[in-house]
Amino acid sequence: MPQDKKPAILVLGKLPEVAQRFADSCTVLATNRNTLTDTLHEQGPQVRLLATRGGVTIDDALLARLPQLEIIAGYGVGYDSIDAVAAARRGIVVTNTPDVLNEEVADLTVGLLLATVRRLPQADRYIRSGQWLQGAFPLAPSLRDRRIGLVGMGRIGKAIARRLAAFDLPLAYHSRQPQADVPYPYYADLLALAAAVEVLIVVVPGGSATQHLINAAVLAALGPQGILINVARGSVVDETALVDALVNGHIQAAGLDVFAREPHVPAALLTLDNVVLTPHIGSGTDYTRARMSDLLLDNLASWLAGKGPLTPVAETPWPRG
């Protein structure tokens, strides 16, 4: 490659800050689902860097059309839309934006839990519709005397646990392995955890390993007083089983920030009064999104400077081992 030729950065999704940061030093190719095929055909062989918001699946077939690709910088902590194993086989580094969103997602999780248990959106609608003039709002469930189980105990799970500890409620967790620095009871078996608690908070990565991890059996174990909170990925919960559990009283309620086919939400969930829905806003504040963007840009800048990635994912460690 000629030394005076600018490196090409392919941008998938709305990341205008990439062009703002690198317009002078790089050729920035912004694209989306509709224009991706043409962009790959015309520019794919020149692309060295890729920045993505996660809306397009980056699989081995797509990577094959980017023979010069060196790094994929992902926006967000989750990177299940990127085949990091395939990238590793091709010598491509994948980065994400961990840590900078932990506290924000943990805040939203606790807020979603409280909104679901105390039925805050329903109470708001009660006033707006004039129903309060006809009588008091029905009594809501309570967090008191509930045990809380976390499915996942990574960075975000630990931030959630720190907040919930202040509620003076028993906590327990399930993850791939016990965490040495976590004082709460560990359940190797997810069904056993679900049976032992009344609130189940899901905060695990997406992908094939966790597809429908929360299924009909787990919901049945959670029981009729159970509340499910999902701030992980929509793919982690079997939505058909969840709707059935909510309709038939197998669990009490659910608070959901993520869905299997975003932005499409199952119609049945929209009609249920025992569900609180938010549109995947776990990290959705100006403060945190700016820091996520900065980290994505810093990963690209560090790579271009020959210093390597700042936050490589586990599948593509750095320095390469």
Image (cartoon, rainbow, N blue to C red):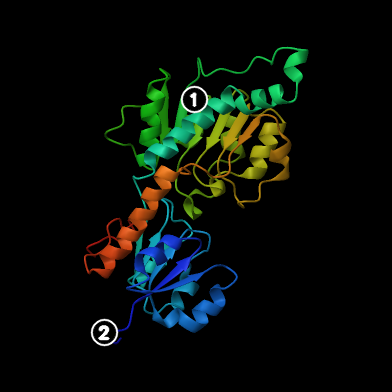
Q: Residues within 10 Å of mark 1 (few under 14, many from 20)?
A: some
The reply to whether residue 171 is in sight is yes
What whole-number distance in Å separates the C-alpha atoms at marks 2 and 1?
A: 62 Å
**Side of 62 where 291 appears, left or right:** left
Residue type marked 2: Gln
Q: Residues within 10 Å of mark 2 (few under 14, many from 20)?
A: few
Residue at image location 75% in from the left, 19% down from the top: 131
The count of marks equals 2
The secondary structure type at the circle numbered 2 is: loop
Residue at image location 22% in from the left, 63% down from the top: 319
What is the quadrant of residue 317 in the picture? bottom left
* Disc with the residue nearer the chain's start (2 vs 1): 2
Q: Nearer the viewer, residue 85 or 288?
A: 288
The reply to whether residue 194 is in sight is no
Quadrant of the drawing holding the C terminus: bottom left
Q: Is residue 127 above or below residue 254?
A: above
The secondary structure type at the circle numbered 1 is: helix
The residue tagged 1 is: 196
Residue type marked 1: Ala
> Which tag is nearer the camera, tag 2 or tag 1?
2
Residue at image location 31% in from the left, 31% down from the top: 182
The residue tagged 2 is: 3
What is the quadrant of residue 17 in the picture? bottom left
Q: Nearer the viewer, residue 276 or 295?
A: 295
Quadrant of the drawing holding the N terminus: bottom left
* Residue 209 pos. (x, y %): 47, 52
* Residue 303 pos. (x, y %): 27, 66
